[in-house]
Amino acid sequence: MKILMVCLGNICRSPLAEGIMKDKIKKHQLDWEVESAGTGAWHVGELPDPRSIKVGKENNIDITDQRAQQFKAAHLNEFDLVLAMDSSNYQNIIRLASTPQQENKVKLIMNYAKPGMNVNVPDPYYGDNGFDQVYNMLDEACDAILLEHR
Ligand code: 4NP
Protein backbone atom coordinates (compact mmCIF):
# COMPACT_ATOMS: atom_id res chain seq x y z
CA MET A 1 0.00 0.00 0.00
CA LYS A 2 1.34 3.40 -1.01
CA ILE A 3 -0.47 6.44 0.41
CA LEU A 4 0.00 10.09 -0.54
CA MET A 5 -1.31 12.74 1.89
CA VAL A 6 -2.16 16.02 0.14
CA CYS A 7 -2.90 19.56 1.38
CA LEU A 8 -2.29 23.03 -0.05
CA GLY A 9 1.23 23.96 1.09
CA ASN A 10 2.62 20.57 2.25
CA ILE A 11 3.96 22.28 5.36
CA CYS A 12 1.12 22.11 7.94
CA ARG A 13 -1.51 19.36 7.58
CA SER A 14 -0.17 16.71 5.18
CA PRO A 15 3.29 16.47 6.85
CA LEU A 16 1.49 15.69 10.12
CA ALA A 17 -0.71 13.15 8.33
CA GLU A 18 2.42 11.53 6.88
CA GLY A 19 4.18 11.45 10.25
CA ILE A 20 1.17 10.08 12.14
CA MET A 21 0.48 7.40 9.51
CA LYS A 22 4.13 6.30 9.41
CA ASP A 23 4.16 6.00 13.21
CA LYS A 24 1.10 3.73 13.19
CA ILE A 25 2.48 1.67 10.30
CA LYS A 26 5.69 1.11 12.22
CA LYS A 27 3.81 0.11 15.38
CA HIS A 28 1.74 -2.39 13.37
CA GLN A 29 4.81 -3.63 11.45
CA LEU A 30 3.14 -3.03 8.10
CA ASP A 31 4.92 -2.81 4.79
CA TRP A 32 3.25 0.44 3.69
CA GLU A 33 4.78 3.59 2.23
CA VAL A 34 3.59 7.12 2.91
CA GLU A 35 4.55 10.47 1.41
CA SER A 36 2.91 13.90 1.34
CA ALA A 37 2.56 16.73 -1.18
CA GLY A 38 0.91 20.12 -1.65
CA THR A 39 -1.20 21.27 -4.56
CA GLY A 40 0.64 24.64 -4.38
CA ALA A 41 4.36 25.16 -5.09
CA TRP A 42 5.16 28.05 -2.70
CA HIS A 43 6.95 25.95 -0.08
CA VAL A 44 8.67 23.28 -2.20
CA GLY A 45 11.90 22.11 -0.53
CA GLU A 46 11.00 23.60 2.86
CA LEU A 47 10.75 21.94 6.25
CA PRO A 48 7.28 21.55 7.78
CA ASP A 49 5.88 24.61 9.57
CA PRO A 50 7.42 24.99 13.09
CA ARG A 51 3.94 24.73 14.61
CA SER A 52 3.41 21.31 12.97
CA ILE A 53 6.88 20.19 14.06
CA LYS A 54 5.98 21.26 17.62
CA VAL A 55 2.65 19.42 17.86
CA GLY A 56 4.24 16.35 16.32
CA LYS A 57 7.07 16.46 18.86
CA GLU A 58 4.57 16.78 21.72
CA ASN A 59 3.13 13.47 20.49
CA ASN A 60 6.54 11.79 19.98
CA ILE A 61 6.39 12.12 16.20
CA ASP A 62 9.41 13.66 14.45
CA ILE A 63 8.60 15.17 11.05
CA THR A 64 11.83 17.13 10.58
CA ASP A 65 13.12 14.72 7.91
CA GLN A 66 10.33 15.88 5.57
CA ARG A 67 10.69 18.44 2.76
CA ALA A 68 7.76 19.88 0.83
CA GLN A 69 6.99 18.68 -2.69
CA GLN A 70 4.27 19.68 -5.13
CA PHE A 71 1.54 17.27 -6.13
CA LYS A 72 1.75 16.14 -9.76
CA ALA A 73 -0.46 14.04 -12.03
CA ALA A 74 2.07 11.17 -12.06
CA HIS A 75 1.37 10.65 -8.34
CA LEU A 76 -2.02 9.27 -9.37
CA ASN A 77 -0.20 6.33 -10.99
CA GLU A 78 2.48 5.95 -8.34
CA PHE A 79 0.18 5.79 -5.28
CA ASP A 80 -2.72 3.49 -4.36
CA LEU A 81 -4.49 6.10 -2.25
CA VAL A 82 -4.33 9.89 -2.57
CA LEU A 83 -5.89 11.44 0.53
CA ALA A 84 -6.98 15.09 0.42
CA MET A 85 -7.19 17.19 3.59
CA ASP A 86 -10.09 19.35 2.35
CA SER A 87 -12.56 19.66 -0.51
CA SER A 88 -10.49 22.33 -2.27
CA ASN A 89 -7.44 20.03 -2.34
CA TYR A 90 -9.75 17.22 -3.47
CA GLN A 91 -11.03 19.23 -6.45
CA ASN A 92 -7.51 20.28 -7.44
CA ILE A 93 -6.34 16.67 -7.43
CA ILE A 94 -9.38 15.32 -9.29
CA ARG A 95 -8.79 17.91 -12.01
CA LEU A 96 -5.46 16.20 -12.78
CA ALA A 97 -6.96 12.68 -12.96
CA SER A 98 -7.32 11.27 -16.45
CA THR A 99 -9.01 7.90 -15.82
CA PRO A 100 -11.79 6.62 -13.52
CA GLN A 101 -9.16 4.35 -11.88
CA GLN A 102 -7.14 7.42 -10.92
CA GLU A 103 -10.24 9.26 -9.67
CA ASN A 104 -11.13 6.30 -7.46
CA LYS A 105 -7.82 6.61 -5.61
CA VAL A 106 -8.67 10.13 -4.43
CA LYS A 107 -10.55 10.45 -1.14
CA LEU A 108 -11.18 13.02 1.57
CA ILE A 109 -9.14 11.77 4.49
CA MET A 110 -11.79 12.49 7.14
CA ASN A 111 -14.30 10.24 5.37
CA TYR A 112 -12.37 7.33 6.92
CA ALA A 113 -13.22 8.57 10.41
CA LYS A 114 -16.65 10.02 9.57
CA PRO A 115 -17.92 8.15 6.48
CA GLY A 116 -19.89 10.22 4.01
CA MET A 117 -19.71 13.43 6.09
CA ASN A 118 -17.15 15.19 3.85
CA VAL A 119 -15.48 16.87 6.83
CA ASN A 120 -12.52 19.14 5.99
CA VAL A 121 -9.32 19.24 8.02
CA PRO A 122 -9.20 23.03 8.62
CA ASP A 123 -6.24 24.96 7.21
CA PRO A 124 -4.33 26.12 10.33
CA TYR A 125 -1.76 28.28 8.49
CA TYR A 126 -3.28 31.69 9.28
CA GLY A 127 -3.84 31.44 13.01
CA ASP A 128 -2.09 29.88 15.93
CA ASN A 129 -4.55 27.58 17.60
CA GLY A 130 -5.63 25.04 15.03
CA PHE A 131 -2.69 22.66 15.22
CA ASP A 132 -3.88 20.53 18.16
CA GLN A 133 -7.25 20.08 16.50
CA VAL A 134 -5.60 19.14 13.20
CA TYR A 135 -3.41 16.62 15.00
CA ASN A 136 -6.38 14.99 16.75
CA MET A 137 -8.45 14.80 13.56
CA LEU A 138 -5.59 13.21 11.62
CA ASP A 139 -4.84 10.75 14.40
CA GLU A 140 -8.47 9.59 14.29
CA ALA A 141 -8.44 9.36 10.48
CA CYS A 142 -5.18 7.37 10.42
CA ASP A 143 -6.57 4.86 12.92
CA ALA A 144 -9.58 4.38 10.64
CA ILE A 145 -7.35 3.99 7.56
CA LEU A 146 -5.45 1.19 9.34
CA LEU A 147 -8.69 -0.55 10.29
CA GLU A 148 -10.00 -0.40 6.73
CA HIS A 149 -6.91 -1.34 4.74
CA ARG A 150 -4.66 -3.57 6.86
P1 4NP B 1 -1.13 23.37 4.57
O1 4NP B 1 -1.22 24.87 5.09
O2 4NP B 1 -1.90 23.33 3.29
O3 4NP B 1 -1.79 22.59 5.65
O4 4NP B 1 0.33 23.06 4.41
C1 4NP B 1 -0.85 25.97 4.29
C2 4NP B 1 0.47 26.31 4.17
C3 4NP B 1 0.84 27.40 3.40
C4 4NP B 1 -0.12 28.15 2.76
C5 4NP B 1 -1.47 27.79 2.87
C6 4NP B 1 -1.82 26.70 3.64
N1 4NP B 1 0.24 29.28 1.97
O5 4NP B 1 -0.66 29.98 1.50
O6 4NP B 1 1.44 29.56 1.82
Image (cartoon, rainbow, N blue to C red):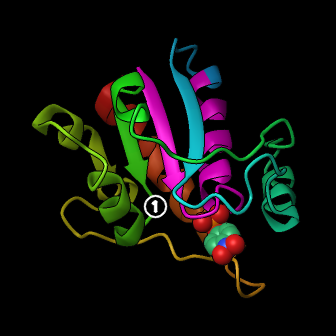
Identify the image quadrant of residue 52.
Answer: bottom right
Q: Which residue is mark 1?
A: 85
| Residue 18 colored in magenta in the image | yes
> In the figure, is residue 40 to the left or right of 56?
left
Q: Quadrant of residue 98?
A: top left
Question: Crowding at label 1, few (<14), some or many (≥20) Cα neighbours within 10 Å?
Answer: many
Q: Which residues are magenta?
A: 1-25
Query: Is 26 left, or right, of 128 in this rendering?
Result: left
Q: Position of 39 compared to 19: left or right?
A: left
Relative side of 90 to 21, left or right: left
The residue located at (64%, 55%) in the rendering is: 10
Relative image position of residue 104 (x, y in whole percent): 18, 40
Q: Is residue 96 magenta?
A: no
Q: Is mark 1 within 8 Å of ligand 1?
A: yes
On-image quarter of the N terminus: top left
Residue 20, position in %: x, y?
64, 43
Question: Please, which residue is most extreme toward the bottom here?
Answer: 127
Name the residue located 11 percent from the left edge and 38 percent from the top edge: 100
